[in-house]
Image (spheres, rainbow, N blue to C red):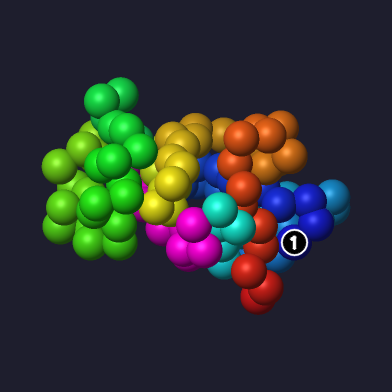
Amino acid sequence: CCPVYLGGSSSPYGIGTNISKRTCDQLRCTGCDFRVSLFNDYIWDQSCDYLFFRNNMPEISKLRAKMIKKKGARAYACQCSWRSIDELTDLQTDQQLRWVCGKH
C-alpha cells in the first residue's frame, strides 16, 4: 500500500494507492511487532490506555470490555497503540502511529 489508509467500516479493504483509496487490512506495528487488529462498527472507550492493550492483546474476549458499538466506525489496535476511525484517513497524518503495510 502506498499511501497506507485507515478508514471506517464502509471503507473497502485492499491495496491502497492514490487512485484506489482502500484501507489496509495487513497492518503491522514496528513498535511492538504485533499485527494490528481491526473491528468494524466499534470504537474504543476513552478510558483505554497503554496497559489495557499491553495486557489484553490479541484476546478479543478481553478487548470487548472497552469496545463501544458505533455504526460506520472501525477500531484499530496493536499492543502499544490504538485508534478509532470514522472516515478514510492517510496513515501519514498521524505521526505517533508506527504502523506499516505488512504486504498483501
Outermost residue to the bottom: 104
User: Can residue 28 be seen here?
Assistant: yes
Residue beneath the point at 23% across and 61% down: 59
Residue beneath the point at 35% across and 38% down: 50
The secondary structure type at the circle numbered 1 is loop
| Highlighted magenta segment, given as a residue range | 32-42
Q: Position of residue 3 (x, y in %)?
A: 78, 51
Q: Position of residue 38 (x, y in %)?
A: 42, 54
Q: Position of residue 66 (x, y in %)?
A: 21, 38
Q: Position of residue 87 (x, y in %)?
A: 57, 34
Q: Is residue 2 above or below residue 51?
A: below
Which of these two is toward me, 72 or 29? 29
Which of these two is toward me, 9 or 52? 52
Left or right, residue 38 beside residue 92: left
Residue beneath the point at 41% across and 58% down: 37
Residue beneath the point at 22% across and 58% down: 60
User: Can residue 12 be seen here?
Assistant: no
Which of these two is toward me, 38 or 36? 36
The quarter of the image holding the N terminus is bottom right
Q: Is residue 102 above or below residue 36?
A: below
Left or right, residue 54 beside residue 84: left
Quadrant of residue 45 in the image?
top left
What residue is disc 1 on? 1
The kind of residue tagged 1 is: Cys
Quadrant of residue 44 in the image?
top left
Which of these two is toward me, 74 or 92? 92
User: Total marks drawn?
Assistant: 1
Quadrant of residue 52 in the image?
top left
Outermost residue to the top: 46
The quarter of the image holding the C terminus is bottom right
Membership of 63 in magenta stretch? no
